[in-house]
Amino acid sequence: MNVGEEGAVVRAAAGDHAAFGTLVEAHWERLLRLARSVVGDADAADAVQDGLLVAWRGLPALRQPDAFPAWLTRVVTRRALARARRRAPWWHRLRPLAEAESVAAPEGANGDGEIDVARLLAALAPRQRAVMHLTVIEGMSDGEIGRVLGIAAASVRSHRRRARHRLLALLQGDDSHASS
Amino acid sequence: MPRREGHPDQETQESQHRLERFEEALRRWAERPAAPPPPWPVPRSSRAGERPALPRWQLVAASLAVAAMLATASLLLRSWWAPENEAHTAAPAAAASVAAVASADEVLVLWLDPDTPLYLTLPAAVEAPGTERSTR
């Protein structure tokens, strides 16, 4: 985070809308990508907007301006997760995860052999999607992901292991489909 | 010596290869161009493709209907409630559960849920001259 952005955080915390606008522009693309992974394309922009509103209200309480990017990521991720959970039908939450995923799991690849990432992500639980995105795209450590999601690093590893297990099952099924 | 098909090492390698393919595809997928941010803040109903907000008269009508239902329920509850239980009704309502509390300087921050901080500015503690705080 550069000095200019730290200054913008301080000004935005004091109520400067323009400064907050520059912060939004600087982080929008990264946050939108994260939200697309967690909640899907259709709701991603709304999830980011929700998070930005929460961030705007909470910014005066942020003591360390250099912590802004991580804090903003945390706020937006949690809003996206809440939105993803609301979108899931309530009976999906009651079923065991594996069963729910196997019902929701579509084929892993398009007809042309290209991996259909959106459909594979949709077969994962929202928190597993977030873990995969933060691991693969943001390159965060388990500890950093744990702080974003409010869970222990060991839980992060567990979510990632289950996500990979699920993805492998879907990808293997798809490969055997393609070869038969 | 050539490995038999289905050997654990080979399966592990294939699994690893599949996951790497997925992660590569995820990177490409995530890097699709994103629409620029709307001017901030944006009234939600002004964005294309979104359902317009309810007309104001509908909101007012809905609010009145809810208020009437609550008032009726309250009257029914009072008439049903036995006088001997009156003492219980006077008990203070349970406080909203607080997910986390942090304080710094003179500001107390409560999170009623993980995403909704509530900020309370506390007055500075003033001690009367000559009084000593007990350590016990």
Image: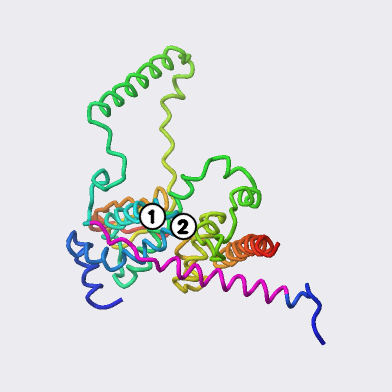
Check the picture and name the quadrant holding the N terminus of chain B.
bottom right
Q: Earlier in the sequence, mark 2 or mark 1?
A: 2
Query: Residue B93's spot in the image, x, y percent?
Result: 41, 33
Relative to A143, is A44 above or below? above
| Residue matched to label 1 | A44
Q: Is residue A48 found inside the magenta-colored segment of the image?
A: no
Q: Secondary structure at mark 1?
A: helix
Query: Considering depth in this image, is A67 or A76 the residue closer to the camera?
Result: A76
Specify the farthest residue to the top.
Answer: B79
Magenta span:
B11-38
Query: Considering depth in this image, is B121 or A103 the residue closer to the camera?
Result: A103
Query: Considering depth in this image, is A36 or B123 the residue closer to the camera?
Result: A36
Q: Amino acid at mark 2?
A: Val
Relative placement, left or right, of A154 versus B39 is right
Mark 1 Cα within 10 Å, few/some/many (few <14, many 20+)?
A: many
Quarter occupied by residue B9: bottom right
| Pointers 2 and 1 within a single chain | yes
Specify the farthest residue to the bottom.
Answer: B1
Query: Residue A6's spot in the image, x, y percent?
Result: 25, 73
Check whether the beta carbons of the residues at disc 2 and disc 1 lie within 8 A of each other: yes
The chain containing the residue under callout 2 comes to A
Query: Residue B98's spot in the image, x, y percent?
Result: 43, 48
Question: Residue at horizontal 36%, vertical 50%?
Answer: B116
Relative to B124, is B96 above or below? above
Quarter occupied by residue A16: bottom left
| Residue matched to label 2 | A38
Relative to B85, is B100 above or below? below
Relative placement, left or right, of B74 versus A139 is left
Q: Secondary structure at mark 2?
A: helix
Q: Amino acid at mark 1?
A: Ala
Relative placement, left or right, of A158 versus A134 is right
Q: What label does residue B111 carry, if any?
A: none
